[in-house]
Amino acid sequence: MTTIESYESALDPARTAFAQDPSVRLVQDPAIGETRLESFLITFNALGVAMTEPVEGWIRRAGQACVDTGGSGTTELGEALQKHAAGEADHHLMMISDLRALCDRRTRAGRPAPDPDDMLGLEWPEPVHRYRELHEDVIAGDTPFAQIAIENEIELLSLGFGAGMLDNARTLLHSDGSELSFLDEHVSLDVGHTAFNKRQMAGFLSERPDALEPLVQAGTAALDAYRAFVGHCLALSPE
């Protein structure tokens, strides 16, 4: 088994736990109903801003930390991360736009809608703090290269979880996509990003097989935090 195959095998439990989580499954299931899915998406976008706005900076800073650390494979990975960072700029603005569009949709339908600015001012729940702290700890620690594992796992979610949620939302909300720009963009964009991530990890691990465990730990922690985030958003979404 190659080192990248060892990484994939080690991530199976966390990926399976995410895919089988009841909240994750429900937001992809038509059984959730239009109203609750709409409420979930409002909360998901509002609280998701805090998890999305810093992404460009996290990747860029992790890349710089890798370059500063130096060593076999680490400098090259750091330079690749820095180049990749610009592609993540301002994605949180799509979430804000979708939040406002979803609230407006409810108002137009004669249903009570929260104020978007009030939603953006919600206190961050524990999973958001955990997700942000994970990135900061990786960047400031001895293994900044583990940022690539976080990116890999979160962007892989777009191809499975994100695509399932997007299809469900289009069906239940009868949406033309104007309220789903963040999901739509990432389902399309992250095909290329996941290929980049896997290529970078495979090359890095061929140079640094000793880095396997930190990569596994970071990828697992990212999935666990994001799974908790989805559950929290659903818990705040009424029937």
Image (cartoon, helix red, strand yellow):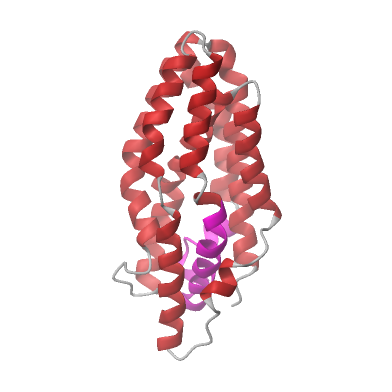
Q: In this view, does 168 lie above or below 51?
A: below
Q: In which quarter of the image is the C terminus?
A: bottom right
Dominant SS of magenta comes to helix
Q: Position of residue 170 (x, y in %)?
A: 35, 67
Which residue occupies the extreme right position in the image?
126
Q: Which residue is drawn at 59% across and 74% down?
A: 118
Decide which of 212, 42 is in the foreground and name it: 42
Above or below 83: residue 171: below
Seen from the viewer's position, the closer of residues 167 and 98 is 98
Magenta part of the protein: which range? 22-50
Q: Residue sitting at 40 percent across and 87 percent down? A: 108
Give how far across and how far down residue 40 sits, in percent: 54, 68
Q: Nearer the viewer, residue 23 or 127?
A: 127
User: Is residue 38 part of the magenta span, yes or no?
Assistant: yes
Q: In this view, does 102 lie to the left or right of 142?
A: left
Q: Residue at x 64, y 38 (%)?
A: 134
* Residue found at the very far left of the displayed protein: 176
Would residue 8 be visible to someone looking at this image?
A: no
Taking the magenta stretch, the answer to whether it contains residue 145 is: no
- Nearer-the-camera pick, 150 or 82: 82
Residue at 47%, 20% (x, y): give it: 4
Residue 20: horizontal and vertical position, in percent?
A: 57, 49
Whole-percent x, y for residue 60 in the image? 47, 33
Q: Is residue 51 above or below residue 96?
A: above
- Would residue 140 be seen by someone viewing this image from the given angle? yes
